[in-house]
Structures are given as C-alpha cells and as structure tokens.
Image (cartoon, rainbow, N blue to C red):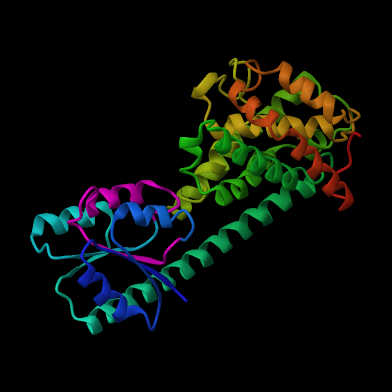
Amino acid sequence: MKTIFIVDDNDTNKVAAKDALDNSYLTFALSSAERMFKLMERITPDLILLDIDMPEMDGFEAMKILSSDPKFKNIPVIFLTAKQDTESEIRGFELGAIDFISKPFSPPVLLKRVEVYLHFDHIIKKSQKAVRDAYEATIRVLANFLESRDKTTGGHVERTQIYLDILLRSMINLGIYSEEVLDWDLDLVVHSAQLHDIGKIGVSDVILNKPGKLSPEEYEKIKLHSILGEEVIAEIIKSSNDDLFLHHAKRFAGSHHEKWDGSGYPRGLSGESIPLEGRVLALVDVYDALVSHRPYKKPFTHEKAIEIINSESGKHFDPQIVKGFASVSDDFWAECEVLAARSIWSGGV
C-alpha cells in the first residue's frame, strides 16, 4: 500500500484529507514540517500533501530541504493550500512541486488527483528502471568482453566494484567528501566503474597479455588506454545524446591513473584537480593489483598492501581517501576471501 503524508497545521484540513484517502492509502497526518522530517527518518512516503502557511517552517522552506536531499528529492509533493496567487504557484513549481490543490477541496477530487499522480509516478519509475537495466546490461557486456581479452586480471572488474562500494560508503560515514558523494547515485556510479579500463580495447593483445615486464615502449602504449577510454565513452555519449549514465564512467576511465602528487597519467593532474572518481578508483585499483596474482609478480599479503597504500598517502593517493580505506580495509580482505571461495580471486594470504 502506498504511503502518503498530509502535512497541515489545520486539524480540519488534516482530518478531511485523511478521511478522503484512508481507504486507499496508508496515511500519516502531521501538524508541522518538523514532524514530517522526524517521521521521514523512519518512513519514506510515496507522496506528500504539503500546506504552505505553517508556523516555524512553511511549506516553501520544507520543499527546499526536500529538493536538496538526495534521499527525498524524488518524492512527489503537492501543495495543499489556500494560496491562489500566481507568484506562489510559480515559486512552488520552481522548488519542485508537481501541483497545487486549493483549499477548501472536494474529498473525491483530492482522491482522484492523488490516484492520477501516483499512477504516473509508477509509470515513470518503471520506465526509468527499464532504461537503467538496459544501461547496466550494456556496461556489463562491454566489461566482460574487455576482461575476456585481458587474461592477466581475471575478476578485476567485479572486485573493483565491490571494493569501490565499500570505500564510498565508508567515506560517507566518515564525512570524507560526503557532500559530493551524497549527490551521486551510488549504485549507478559503482556500475559505471566497470568501464574504467574500456580503453584497453585499443591495446594490442600481445602487450595486454605479456607474461613479463613491459618494455618502456610497451608501457607508453598501454598508458594510452586512459585517453582511449575517455574517447570511447565520449563517443557513446555523443551518439546517445545522454550523458546521465556515462558521466562517471568517463571520469573513471580518464583519471584513475592520475596521482595526488601530479606524477600520474594521462594529464599529470594533482590534488583535488583530479576528479573524485579517479582518486577513489586509484586506491581500489592498486589494492586489487597488490593482493592479486599477476604473471609478472606474486600477490602481496593484505597487511603488506595496507602498508604500501599508507606509504603512498599524499603521493599516489589522496590522504583523506586513505583514511576512508583504513576504516574498512578488513572489509576489503573479507570480500577477497568470499571471492576466492567463488573462484573469482586468487591472491595472497
């Protein structure tokens, strides 16, 4: 059953709206925006009916908070108000409201309006899910194709996704770049990281699968995969005219080999001029390389990998992100053991 919040400081209006909707929805009648936000710590509504003229925090102020919070900004809001001036309506729509219903209202009309909006909201979300599923499937196919060419890094794509998810959530919990990360759709970002090495599609199989150390000339060729990856993703964006899904993938591809001190490639960026996506993936990518078997090296132990990453804080890695890693490094290792049991990882002990 869909959940609706009715937020109004007038008891008569609250009761009338609740009576109109109670038979079809789970409703909560709240006398203030403050109470609404308190309840939203436990319950996320499917729709909010919000009064404008309320003491302490009015509907416009509440709408600003809702629209700025990634957890709540997609909840449809209808202003249920006695205001009927054009200026108020324009302001409400600019803040993200989907409609205005004037008071006093007809209960049957209120019910029908709510039914219509929730129906359309369901259709939109279903359509968005279909697009998202298609996007994720496309990324997965591309990533699997790439990994089938590179015989030296089996399972790397799946492992980096898992580590990345752990690290980003740690950063949010610790307040490390949390304002930027909270604006991201984490599931989407983690999926898009699968394409970080897509540029290797333009690297020769001979170089990609060389069992020994690369020559300086071969290393220069493989370094091109960052720029090539950006170009491949940019071409997809151009062809689809939609940068929503691939925005983060392009940043991952182009910047995950940059280093905090400016000694990385392809552009020699340093510090916070490196996109956050690249700074986070740089650590994840190196951790996986350290603890995994490669034809040219034996795997390091988890403890040695931590030691190396700590020693590179402020050089290869963003010191703040190293702090985030320190708080969850054992979770990385626990995932290694799980993946080993599934034969998706073979590394140090």
Residue at 45% of width from left, 48% of height from top?
A: 243
Picture coordinates of residue 86 (x, y %)?
Answer: 9, 59
Q: Quadrant of residue 49?
A: bottom left
In the rendered image, is residue 38 in sight? yes
Is 330 in front, or is 16? 16
Q: Quadrant of the C terminus?
A: top right
Q: What is the span of residues highlighted in magenta in the rendered image?
A: 44-73
In the rendered image, is residue 150 in sight? no
Instruction: Examine the rendered structure and indicate whether residue 336 appears above or below residue 25.
Output: above
Instruction: Examine the rendered structure and indicate whether residue 248 appears above or below residue 306.
Output: below
Residue at 49% of width from left, 23% of height from top?
A: 273
Picture coordinates of residue 71 (x, y %)?
Answer: 45, 52
Residue at 65% of width from left, 37% of height from top?
A: 167
- Was residue 31 drawn as part of the magenta stretch in this picture? no
Q: Residue furthest front?
A: 11
Is 312 in front, or is 43? 43
Q: Quadrant of residue 2?
A: bottom left
